[in-house]
Structures are given as structure tokens and as C-alpha cells.
Image (cartoon, grey):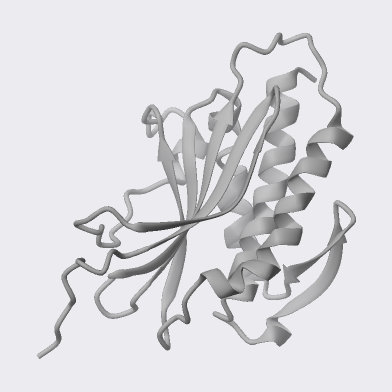
């Protein structure tokens, strides 16, 4: 397998675990909805509910061909109000795939996994960098593409639909959590909150 495909495979597998960890630590569901597992020699959590597990799995696995081609810029976990779709918090994975890597070259899987493992270790300790979510909030996985995939050309592209969450009008407050840079992949994880100058939503 060439460098880009192998890197994309490892990254997609990592994102599935990392997104599940984010949802667990944000306490969107009861703790009993998850079970402890080991991945990359780190303690992580896996969703017990098939619908939740399948949503995360299908969302990130549908990104594989686009990550491999370097089309995915960011993958986000967005938490928003149930009633008005106003975003409260965004966890952002910013990706950079080295497209100049030779298709015949190989990567050291252990080295890449070691770097990604540091993200999984950092996530539980980042709770103090985030804010409590309102009751009955919703969440979704959203991807930002450098180039739009052509809907109808593949079943992977058809999985993705435009999000209807409301976007912030001002630049958000950004808190870095972890970053890495290697030959095949660069990755940044940060959390975004609305700016204090962001208009407040009022309900009558």
C-alpha cells in the first residue's frame, strides 16, 4: 500500500476513536453508553449503542478517499443548541496530507501511531479548556473540503450533505490542544468558542 493510502487509513481509524472520545468527555450521553477499550496503547472509549457507533464510523470512513487525495481540510465535531442550531463549541481537526510523497514509498506505521496516540492522551486532560454544554444539545460531524466532491459520482460523496448549523458572525476564540507534523501528515486539534462579541440569540 502506498504512503497516502496507508496514512489515510491510519488517520480515519484514529478520527473514529478520537471523535468518540470527544463525545464521551463532553457527557452528551450517560457514561454507561460507552465501554473502555485500548487503542494505540491508550485507554479510550467505544460507543455501545449501534446507531451512535455506526454514525461515527460511517461518517469518518466516508472521508477516506477524500483524505487520500488531500481534499479534506478540516474535520469538526460541532455541538449546537437543539432548538435554534446555534453552535456552542467546535472541536477542529485540521489536516495536511503531503501529496508529494512517492506512491511507492512506505511510512513507519509505529511512528505515526505514536504521534497520534499523544492526541488521545491529551483529550481527557483538555476538559478544563472547554465549556459545559446546555441541556439537550445536539452534535454532528462536519467536514470542510478544499475541493467539493462531486455528488452522484460515488456513494462516499453522497453521504455528505450541507450542514444547517448556524455559523458565527465573528472570528471565534481558539484554544490549541495538540499538534503534530511529520513527513506524510500534519495534524492540529483545537477547540473553538464563540467570540464575546457574537450576537446573543434571544427567545420570545
Q: At 25% from the left edge and 62% from the top edge, which residue is drawn?
A: 166
Q: Is residue 93 left or right of residue 6?
A: left
Q: Position of residue 44 (x, y in %)?
A: 78, 65
On the image, which quarter does residue 95 sit in? top right
Residue 93 left/right relative to 113:
left
**Relative to 179, does residue 32 appear above or below in the rendering?**
below
Residue in the image at 33% along x and 77% along y: 81
Residue 115 in the image: above or below residue 190: above
Q: Nearer the viewer, residue 199 or 21?
A: 199
Q: Quadrant where the C terminus lies?
A: bottom left
Q: Position of residue 165 (x, y in %)?
A: 30, 62
- To which quarter of the image does residue 2 belong? top right
Residue drawn at x 48%, y 28% is 71
Between 65 and 119, the residue placed more toward the observer is 119
Residue at left 27%, top 53%? Answer: 171
Q: Position of residue 19 (x, y in %)?
A: 61, 59
The image quadrant where one finds the N terminus is top right
> Residue 136: horizontal and vertical position, in percent?
42, 85
Residue lying furthest left in this view? 204
Residue 103 vs 15, above or below: the answer is: above
Amino acid at each position: 500500500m502506498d504512503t497516502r493510502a496507508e496514512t489515510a487509513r491510519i488517520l480515519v481509524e484514529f478520527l473514529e476513536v478520537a471523535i468518540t472520545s470527544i463525545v464521551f468527555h463532553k457527557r452528551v450521553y450517560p457514561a454507561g453508553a460507552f465501554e473502555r477499550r485500548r487503542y494505540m496503547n491508550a485507554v479510550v472509549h467505544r460507543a455501545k449503542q449501534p446507531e451512535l457507533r455506526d454514525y461515527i464510523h460511517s461518517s469518518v470512513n466516508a472521508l477516506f478517499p477524500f483524505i487520500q487525495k488531500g481534499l479534506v481540510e478540516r474535520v469538526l465535531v460541532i455541538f449546537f443548541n437543539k432548538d435554534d442550531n446555534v453552535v456552542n463549541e467546535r472541536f477542529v481537526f485540521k489536516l495536511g496530507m503531503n501529496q508529494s510523497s512517492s506512491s511507492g514509498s512506505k511510512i513507519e506505521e509505529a511512528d505515526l501511531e505514536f504521534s497520534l496516540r499523544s492526541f488521545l492522551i491529551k483529550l481527557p486532560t483538555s476538559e478544563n479548556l472547554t465549556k459545559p454544554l446546555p441541556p439537550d444539545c445536539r452534535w454532528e460531524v462536519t467536514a470542510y473540503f478544499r475541493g467539493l466532491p462531486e455528488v452522484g459520482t460515488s456513494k462516499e460523496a453522497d453521504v455528505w450533505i450541507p450542514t444547517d448549523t448556524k455559523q458565527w458572525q465573528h472570528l471565534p476564540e481558539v484554544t490549541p490542544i495538540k499538534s503534530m507534523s511529520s513527513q506524510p501528515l500534519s495534524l492540529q486539534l483545537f477547540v473553538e468558542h464563540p467570540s464575546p462579541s457574537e450576537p446573543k440569540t434571544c427567545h420570545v
